[in-house]
Image (cartoon, rainbow, N blue to C red):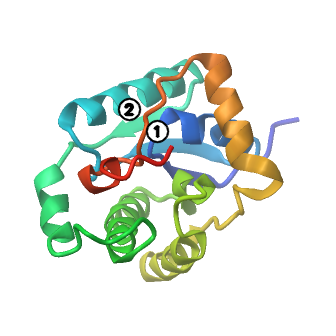
Amino acid sequence: MAEPCKPRLLFHVCCAPCSGLLSRRLAERFDLTVYFDNPNIWPEEEFWKRAKEAEKYFLAEGVDFILTDWGHESWRKLAEGLEREPEKGRRCRQCYDYRLERAAEYAARRGFDYFTTSLLISPWKDGQAIRNLGSALGQKHGLKFLADDFQADNGYGKAKDFARERGFYRQKYCGCEYSRKNVMI
């Protein structure tokens, strides 16, 4: 008997440590494609470290992997005037909006049913703001936003353990030059 078709999910990821374990869980329910679009990451060498680590892992797992250009200058223009904002502040919300809008547009153009983001696992991100934004973008683009609580049941701790067991490169800050000044991980 043939396995029923799974709905297609575009999974926006920020790095392998936050998304590796999640991807295995999501692949049980969805036909999964990983989307790495993070122009906020600075410096460029850091962007490529994270991108290549994620690409290596997901390709080894047999998961389709989409890598976008760095595009940091566009992101910096978006963050102008918000440099001093704290984590979870207005700069972060602008960043969520920018990246999730791009993910939703990509997913809609390519016929995905759902999209979501690994940002939902981080205790340093505003999960409710991300869920609200994802739901609104889903409606705008004719998609469903998967708003699962990835932090539930110690999700972040389990993701860190999974990353450590696999020897993933693990960065010391969320990504942008402004979060780097406030090292938090």
- Most extreme residue toward the front is 182
Asked if residue 63 is positioned above or below residue 88 in the image, the reply reads above
Question: Residue shown at 38%/39% (left/top)?
Answer: 66
In depth, the one of 46 and 28 nearer the eye is: 46
Does residue 47 appear left or right of residue 50 in this picture? left
Task: Mark yes or no: residue 5 visible.
Answer: no
Which residue is identified by label 2?
Answer: 50
> Is label 1 in contact with label 2 (beta carbons under 8 Å)?
yes
Mark 1 neighbour density, 10 Å: few (under 14) some (14–19) many (20 or more) = many
Task: Determine the image quadrant of residue 56.
Answer: top left
Question: Residue shown at 39%/59% (left/top)?
Answer: 103
**Chain-order first, disc 1 or disc 2:** 1
- Most extreme residue toward the right is 1
Identity of the amino acid at label 2?
Answer: Arg
Asked if residue 76 is positioned above or below residue 135 in the image, the reply reads above
Task: Determine the image quadrant of residue 82.
Answer: bottom left
Q: Distance between the Cα atoms at labels 1 and 2?
A: 6 Å
Which residue is identified by label 1?
Answer: 15
Q: From the image, which quarter does the N terminus lie in?
A: top right
Q: Where is residue 29 in the image (x, y as percent from the top left)?
A: 75, 48
Asked if residue 128 is positioned above or below residue 17 in the image, the reply reads below
Task: Mark yes or no: residue 75 visible.
Answer: yes
Mark 2 neighbour density, 10 Å: few (under 14) some (14–19) many (20 or more) = many
Tag 2's secondary structure?
helix
> Across the whole image, how many numbered discs are drawn on residues?
2
Tag 1's secondary structure?
loop
Q: Where is residue 110 in the image (x, y as percent from the top left)?
A: 41, 56
Question: Residue shown at 36%/25% (left/top)?
Answer: 52
Q: Position of residue 130 (x, y in %)?
A: 52, 71
Task: Determine the image quadrant of residue 18.
Answer: top right
In depth, the one of 2 and 128 nearer the eye is: 128
